[in-house]
Image (spheres, coloured by chain):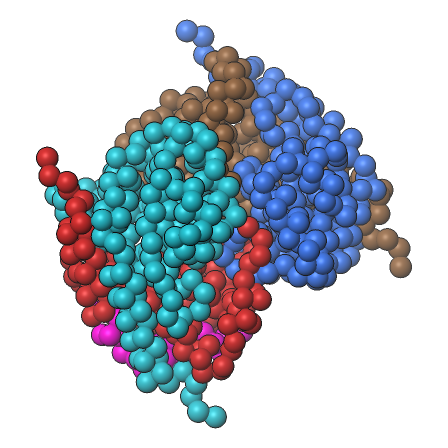
Chain colours: A cyan, B brown, C blue, D red
Amino acid sequence: MPDVLDRSGVLNRARAVLAEVHDAVTAVDPAAAAALGAAITTARTVFFDARGRSGLVAKALAMRWMHLGLRVHVAGETTAPAITADDLLVCLSASGRTTGPLANAGVARARGARVAVVTAAPDSPLAAEADLVVVVPTGGGQHGGSLFEQACLLLGDALCGAFQHAHAIPDAALSERHANLL
Amino acid sequence: MPDVLDRSGVLNRARAVLAEVHDAVTAVDPAAAAALGAAITTARTVFFDARGRSGLVAKALAMRWMHLGLRVHVAGETTAPAITADDLLVCLSASGRTTGPLANAGVARARGARVAVVTAAPDSPLAAEADLVVVVPTGGGQHGGSLFEQACLLLGDALCGAFQHAHAIPDAALSERHANLL
Amino acid sequence: MPDVLDRSGVLNRARAVLAEVHDAVTAVDPAAAAALGAAITTARTVFFDARGRSGLVAKALAMRWMHLGLRVHVAGETTAPAITADDLLVCLSASGRTTGPLANAGVARARGARVAVVTAAPDSPLAAEADLVVVVPTGGGQHGGSLFEQACLLLGDALCGAFQHAHAIPDAALSERHANLL
Amino acid sequence: MPDVLDRSGVLNRARAVLAEVHDAVTAVDPAAAAALGAAITTARTVFFDARGRSGLVAKALAMRWMHLGLRVHVAGETTAPAITADDLLVCLSASGRTTGPLANAGVARARGARVAVVTAAPDSPLAAEADLVVVVPTGGGQHGGSLFEQACLLLGDALCGAFQHAHAIPDAALSERHANLL
């Protein structure tokens, strides 16, 4: 039996992933991305919501925005309070049809909060609920939402980096907020 | 084959659990419990830390204190920042030897934070690190830390209730902070 | 200013909590509780689902059933696969109206899985979706679902204990499955 | 005041992130990555362990391997049992000095499990504990471990994709295992 996970197979697959994520991230409208960054950094409190692997990416971004000094919560986590007016809900959903974020977008709007949606589906019900939509056009050869999730992590980290740079926030300020309990 | 989970078996077991938790909770020194409540409600920010089932009880208590208006975090959760001086770390550990809380107690003290420990083992390494120890004497017939976890939930909720009552905080104030995102 | 969290206040509150949880647990129909235990221990895989503090209690129970050798998952956790026929969904919801469990009960039934509901509201939409309902009658003087959550933990642990005893499973067998990674 | 999160700032930052992650992923030794894939896909059960944002990436990878049909757990999650011989522990740690994974690597080895480490620090204590090390060389201009985390997600997904392709596993088989409870 040939080695099914051989060097060249892994290498080719990694190159394919890199090419796909490059195309997805560079296809995002930078004005929409900048508007998302502005919405995040001017909200009183930002709530992130997503499910499955997108939910894990949303948590990674929430953590970095916390390091940058923002008031941030993740829907469903222990210490997340109620969302209220002046807050922002950021939903990540490739399909734009995930039940949880869809229900939460309705709650957020009813409370007077703003809703931002990052999705691959601009015509989806979730996008229809949003004040602000960032379309991450995916496709490619990977399973399910993998490309969407990768692109969201890179794009989100780019927003964090742009914000840190624009405000000249030193790395030490982020490190000081970094969790020191394991 | 007899029905192994029959009515009377379940009923007897439930009565045994109730008796055990009654004895454990009433054996706690109320002065120590009150001191824990005072430490929690006067800290700038309270961090809860525990592992396994005790960790789930700690999260339940953290959530209720958040409802009561305190600044609360859970070690290891996405949006928990660094612990600093003026903060309080509350560790729950039946054995007083759980690796994570033990390491975290050292970190907290090094940063100038206070450390409170709820444990069944007053002579444990974790208790030795603490500024404040609440001993929940367990034993009984249940597996592992079950009794400790039950007693901590009831005792912790009693502290929350005593605080709410003492400050005449209306239920509506808690409900307003209750997470509205699912 | 008087000490708002004084010894006698805490002690009185703890005794009130103990009395309430005693009344709630002993008011549960032991036949219904035994039926829940039988459903859990005969399913191919058991999925637990609840939100907020009830969700934390559900996780504590899921963990103990895993220790007892069952195949168990928690809705929304990383490694939880799809629920399918022959599986059981156990929902905890005081109100019987929590959005997530309500949606999930519908999914579970559509896939041919059984649904068990533990609730304080026998006439709720969630109870209407269930193959099996355990009513935990709550009321009392505590905030929100506290009494429900306490009663569910004690009752659930009593079921675990009854199962362990009935099958003469030694504590060592549970300890062997207990997580050893921190 | 100029718009600090303007279009060109975001675009430039996104391009910089893409370039960094491209360089990091292509600098990984494909033989080491293939060996990691082989270790994962031949273990009886795979445990993933990482903290902070790396922990979220580890969970995303664990979820995908579950979709692919492997027996997978995440250290610290509710239903994770004890690690034993024939299992594999996969740790992600940029510094190779994270307390939790370091302690867990020792536990895993003591139980006879294998340990794989993905790190930016080949000379770290964690790498010294490993049976298998994959070095993800990072550096670049991003804060903290961002580049490491991005590279681990892309590289890990590439391994999943290579495995799916090599075994001709249809997308439908993954979708069937995809969580259907929200």
| Residue C173 left/right relative to B61 | right
Say if C32 sits above or below D73 in the image.
above
Residue D27 among those drawn in magenta: yes
User: Is residue D181 at least partly visible in the picture?
Assistant: yes
Q: Residue drawn at (45%, 51%), measured in percent from left and top? A: A124
Which of the 4 quarters of the picture holds residue D151? bottom left
Q: Which residues are magenta?
A: D24-46
Say if B173 sits above or below D110 in the image.
above
| Residue A62 left/right relative to C140 | left
Question: Toward the viewer: C87 or B10?
Answer: C87
| Residue D56 left/right relative to B167 | left
x, y (%) of residue D60? 42, 60
Question: Toward the viewer: D23 or C147?
Answer: D23
Taken as a whole, is the magenta stretch helix, strand or loop?
Answer: helix
x, y (%) of residue D25? 26, 71
User: Is residue B75 at least partly visible in the picture?
Assistant: no
Residue D165 among those drawn in magenta: no
Residue sticking out furthest to the left: D1
Q: Residue drawn at (41%, 47%), measured in percent from left and top? A: A127
Which of the 4 quarters of the picture holds residue B27? top right
Say if C158 sits above or below D76 in the image.
above
| Residue B173 left/right relative to C81 | left
Q: Residue drawn at (33%, 43%), measured in percent from left and top? A: A132
Residue sticking out furthest to the top: C1
Q: Residue drawn at (72%, 58%), measured in percent from left and top? A: C112
Dividing the image into 4 quarters, which one contains the N terminus of chain B? bottom right
Say if D2 sits above or below D182 in the image.
above
x, y (%) of residue D97? 29, 59
Question: Toward the viewer: D173 or C80?
Answer: D173
x, y (%) of residue D119? 29, 66
Residue sticking out furthest to the bottom: A1
